[in-house]
Image: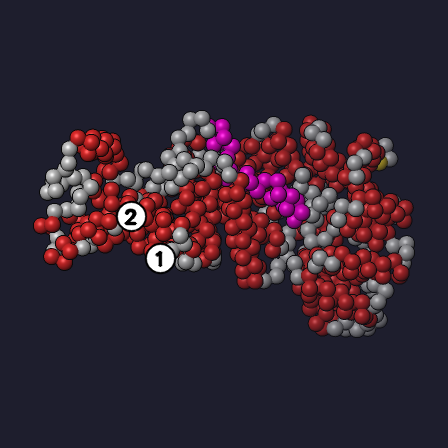
Amino acid sequence: MSSTISNSPSPATTTTISRLTDFVKSNRRALLISLSIAIAATAGTIYLSSSSNNSTNSSSSSCSKTSKKKKDSKKSKKNRKKNTTTPQNQKSDHQLPPSSQLSSSQKSEEDDQEDDPINFTKEVIESLPEETRCRYAFILKTNGNKAYQAKNYQRAIEYYSKAIECEQKAVYYSNRAACYTYLNDPEAVVKDCTEALRLDKHYIKALNRRASARELLGGEENLFLALCDFTACVILDEFKTDHKGETADRVMKRYAGEKAKSIIKERGPRLPSNMIIRAYLDAFRQKPKPSLPPEPNQADNTLMMAYDALANFDYNHACSLFHEAVEQVPSTTELRAHGYLMKATFLFLMSQPQAALEDFNRALEEKPDLIQAWIRKASVNMELGSLETAMNDFAEALKIDVNDPDVYYHRGQVYNVTEQHHLSIEDYRRSIDLDPSFIFSHVQLAVATYKNGDVPKAMQMFKEYMVVDGHETSSPEVHNYYGELLFAEQKFDEALKRFDSAIQLEENRTGPKNVLPWVNKALVYATAQSDVAKATESCMKALEIDSNCEVAIQHLAQFKLQSNEIKEALKWYEKGIEVAMTELGLSQFIQFHVAAMAQLVFMENYPEFAARLGLQ
């Protein structure tokens, strides 16, 4: 399901990024080649022009049409040898052109030319009948193969080049490309494979060879074209070889990773959606804002204005004011510490963990016992991949106050992320003992219990949370999380009721709304009822409320793919690229987008497949 809080452990079952990551892991193969299901369903009726061993005949000249005549000629010749001797001046099928067609210098080399047609000039080749040219092309290819096997690649190139002069055939270009591969000339490989595919677009070996060369050349354009080639290989090969799909996946990841880094660098920092900001801030128990001194300075007043903007959910203005207050330098240690604390918090939300870490440290320099700074610093260190440092931060916080419930809650979130559910259960319980009013501690305890394998107990806990003072709880979070567990247990009707209740409560809520109940409802429609139209409608409603919800965008694009609306899916993946906050989230949207693009290119290059599979 889709509950999430971005950037750090929070009240959601998992973070936005972890949900997208799980979604990628479980769906990448289907998204990479969304045609696979359709192909599998119609495999018995689809004819592929190229077999799995890459034989290619579609580009042959009239030689292929006269192959039967060749065989008959050979049989006739053998019979003649048994019964009579061919006159010396009689022209056989295998003789060179009459000497009258050759210059005097060519006459002296006639025997050599007959042994090795690589010495034929362009004029000689053009003078030969088509059938004879094709026969010599085959001889040249055979000699080229021998040179190739002997690793004499330059000589092999000469043979294949002369074969191409005799006959335009895809296999000759592809074989020459193989030589260029070993000579580390990827540009020549691409050129020859392109010629081979001009003659036979179903030639899988040439597609694969060109894709590998383009991957080697690198760069955004070449990597995209490589993915298009690998995608075509996978589909034309009827998904028979896992290696081809894995190779396409590797190229897709590289393309997306490089492009994501470039976009993040050019884009600069920005805040996530209001839903994500509220979810992160709600993961901490509310604290009163710091008090002003008797004679506040300008920075002190700016800091108070920032807290007021925060209370009114005006996050962009609050972020700007916290930065401004720090620059103006508040008058007291307490105010300076809180200024750095909130500036660092917004830097973290803007996916600038290193800058956030520096300001959390400045806050602690001003006020070493500021527990919230230690807790949030731990989240940053987790983001930076330092679990040990994060745990040390929690330990420092507990030295200050062993009874602070937030420390246990957020450490429990870290244990949850690292799948140490028995430890997270202990910390959630401790947090509840210290402050039973914080609903997220209860919710996460039930979720951790479920993840730890005790499904009946987790369900019972949620049933108890549903009733408060004899009435159904007004917490949309309880309804939504309970619905997610019911969904996981395939109790779809009950899950749908919980999501509807969560939606009703969210609609009556002030401030930014959590749109995940709408997304979860969409998943019920898509999964349990196979009603993509209703699923799409529910996701669209979520995006009307929060246009930057990455999870809603992701699922909506997937629904479009399921409906074979690839161009529509591309629009939503582009929207995801536009709004994604982290490099990881951005990379995943780019992967989906480029995979869909590669499929679209395949459909344009192979329209017969699109028509047979009913694709748009």
Which span is picked out in magenta?
16-42
What's the distance in space between the residues labelled 2 and 1, CA to CA?
Answer: 14 Å
User: Could you tell me if residue 461 is visible in this image?
Assistant: yes
Residue shown at 14% from the left, 46% from the top: 97
Marks 2 and 1 close (CB-CB < 8 Å): no
Q: How is the image coloured?
A: secondary structure
Q: Can you say whether 256 is above or below 499 in the image?
A: below
Residue shown at 29% from the left, 43% from the top: 138
Q: Is residue 616 left or right of residue 387?
A: left
The residue that mark 1 highlights is 154
Which secondary structure, mark 1? helix
Residue shown at 63% from the left, 45% from the top: 20
Which labelled disc corresponds to residue 140?
2
Residue 519 image offset from top left, x and y in percent = 63, 39
Mark before the other along the chain sequence, 2 or 1: 2
Residue 17 drawn in magenta: yes
